[in-house]
Image (spheres, rainbow, N blue to C red):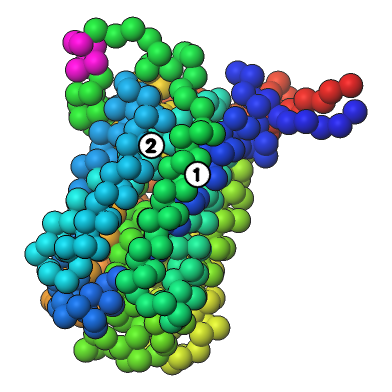
Amino acid sequence: MTPQSTLSPQGTPLIFGMPKKLVFGYVALAIFMTGDGIDLVFLSRYLVTAQGFTPEQAGLCFTVYGFMAALAAWTTGVLADLFGPKRLMLLGGTLWIALHVLFLLVGISDPTLAVITYGLRGIAYPLFMYSFVVLIAESTEPGKLASAMGWFWAAFSIGLGTLGAFIPSLTVPAIGEMATLWLSVAFVGAGTLICLFLVPGAPKDALVNQPLTREEKTRELLRGITILAEKPQICLSVVIRVLCNLTLYGFPLMMPLYLTGVYSDSQTWFTQEEWMRLWAVTSAVQILTNIIWGRLGDRFGWMRQMRWFGFVGMALATLAFGYFPLFFGDNLLMMYLAGVLFSASVTAFVPMGAIFPALAPEHRGAAISAHNLASGLTTFLGPAIVTVFHPLLGSLGVIWVYAALMLLGTVTTFFIHPPQPGITDEQGRELSREEKAAYRAEHGAPGSQRVVVDA
């Protein structure tokens, strides 16, 4: 007998926590996000040093981009529920290509047009990325969702961070920034085509496959907003979802300017290529830690993991990125150590994708819309913190703002109590040791799956 796959209690085949039928969706996401992330590690510096933008104008491009992404992300969960996640993924890919080409043709040399065209491009990637979150949630049993989301964030890290940073570290010296920016279109196009031909639609029992009146559809769309008032725990979860990834989106704006000496209060500790490879290695580590934290969160508890390993770890990693260059100069090894700490901490938040549906299982799409709103807001606020506070506080002042917000997140986690099978009861109260043992005896360890074999 040979192991074939694992099954969730709902009968969905899983491979090490990944829904088997969505394998090509994860592949499409990794390739799409590679194209989306290629500009992330060098665009701010390129706009300042080659196109004549001020650091504030470059920061405004990223800030508006994040704001538009937040608006798009907020509605994606409910829209995907109503109209189908695959359909929205294809729309996102098409829009991304059109808007990126517009940015390169008319926007990149003019600060005002850059803010408009690059900012509008922020609408596109949430449609692709967060619609896939809905498809994962519709295809995965709740007790295994953090594991499935671990694979989601692994694919995200492969694309946006690892390949998205490593490829330009090779192509920018060889063919220049503009040619590298055009290269991203090929990756986004490939990811969109994989989605078109190889990613399945929503399951039969999904909301999109149920007949709904116009009033019911309108009510579902509005619930993406009203659920924040109806469910205070979701509102608090939005807060920690915003806080947990601020540096993930703020550092690609700030660090190319800080570490290469563009800011007046920094030094030329590293070259642009060294920075890009540092970020690529940091993201590569996240591929593994995303998967590990997904499994550990399902087995040992979502909130405890995020509180201590996530927020406290991120506060330390943020300070390391700011102070290691001052303490150790151009020691790239020490920066890699800071990057590993950053990766191990930022990926401890993998369970966020499971917490929102768990807090509102009867309105999964609206809950995921709240999750996506927070994800979009962190894309906006991460760079906005640099744009607003750097002129006021300087580079290290921004570092301390980020670190303080991580500590705020630590405190906020004590007020959120999601139900987690085998860890807490339906009210979010943590089970006693005896209750956990009884659950394991009946269902197996939380987050584990039984192996199904063919004779």
Q: Position of residue 256 (x, y in %)?
A: 34, 77
* Circle 2 residue: 89
Q: Nearer the viewer, residue 238 or 269?
A: 269
Residue at x 21%, y 42% (from the top left corner): 71
Q: Nearer the viewer, residue 393 or 454?
A: 454
Indicate the amino acid at tag 2. Met
Q: Nearer the viewer, residue 62 or 184?
A: 184
Mark 2 or mark 1, earlier in chain? 1
The answer to if 76 sits in the magenta stretch is no
Task: Name the side, left or right, on which 296 lies relative to 386.
Answer: right
Tell me where the magenta segment starts and ends, as one range: 214-219
Marks 2 and 1 in Cβ contact (< 8 Å): yes
Q: Position of residue 231 (x, y in %)?
A: 28, 28
Task: Name the side, left or right, on which 106 lies relative to 186.
Answer: left
Q: Is residue 258 above or below residue 128?
A: below
Q: Tell how many labels.
A: 2
Q: Which mark is residue 143?
A: none
Q: Most prominent secondary structure in the magenta stretch?
A: helix
Q: Is residue 23 above or below residue 403?
A: above
* Circle 1 residue: 28
Q: Is residue 376 visible?
A: no
Q: Position of residue 181 (x, y in %)?
A: 35, 66
Q: Position of residue 60 (x, y in %)?
A: 16, 65
Indicate the amino acid at tag 1. Ala
